[in-house]
Amino acid sequence: MLGKTKTTGSSVESRTKVGTLIGEGAVFDGDLTAPETVRVDGTVNGNCTCEKELIIGTEGQIKGNVSAQNIIISGQVTGDLTVHGKLELLSTGKVIGDIAARSLVIDEDAHFDGRCTMLTGADSGASVHALTDKAAGANTDEDTES
């Protein structure tokens, strides 16, 4: 149609108000927790917890475990993801780690290396605790043996 331009990326990505931005070239070392939407175009070296959406741009990288309501990945995540709603792995996105999500969309040419668990409303609390315990390095029988 005339006057329409083709958009790239997710439609949610362009409509969401971002509360926290890690800009391209910026490096954040440590755990990041935010009550609003977060967009990462730089690098986060640590766990990332977001109560709303997490958007990882094409140059964005997270090296740690991630938890959010919805996640859109155009960049790279190395760590486990817990998504209470929808995870979108776009064509330029790469995930190396396990996923626990209620809804999952993987575009053609995206890269995913790990395991995926699909959550229901009753599952999400238990799976979140399991991945959180894993991220915190919770003691297991193997850890307590001498």
Image: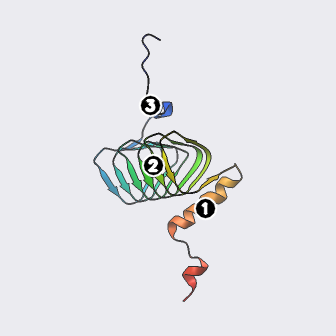
Callout 2 amino acid: Lys
Nearest the eye: 144 or 58: 58
How many angstroms separate mark 3 from mark 1 (CA)?
31 Å
Mark sitting earlier along the chain (3/2): 3
Mark 3 vs mark 1: which is more N-terminal? 3
Against 4, residue 66 (above or below) is below
Above or below 142: residue 97 = above
Residue at coordinates 41% horizontally, 45% vertically from top-left? 75
Give x and y (percent) for residue 91: 46, 39
What residue is pinned by disc 1?
Answer: 129
- Mark 2 / mark 1, whichever is N-terminal: 2
Circles 3 and 1: CB atoms closer than 8 Å = no
Amino acid carrying label 3: it is Ser
Residue 126 lies, in percent from the top left, at 66, 59
Q: Quadrant of residue 40?
A: top left
Q: Left of 45 or right of it: where is 91?
A: right
**Which residue is drawn at the image coordinates 63% and 58% (left, top)?**
127
Q: Which mark is residue 35?
A: none
Vertical arrangement, residue 88 with respect to residue 146, above or below: above
Is 22 left, or right, of 55 in this rendering? left
User: Mark 3 near mark 2, Cβ–Cβ under 8 Å?
Assistant: no
Could you say whether the residue bearing mark 3 is in a helix, strand or loop? helix
Q: Secondary structure at mark 1?
A: helix
Q: Report helix, strand or loop for mark 2.
A: strand
Mark 3 vs mark 2: give the one in front.
2
Q: Position of residue 146 (x, y in %)?
A: 54, 89
Image quadrant assignment for residue 133: bottom right
In the picture of the structure, the residue carrying the numbered disc 2 is: 94
| Colour basis | rainbow
Q: On residue 14, which mark appears?
A: 3
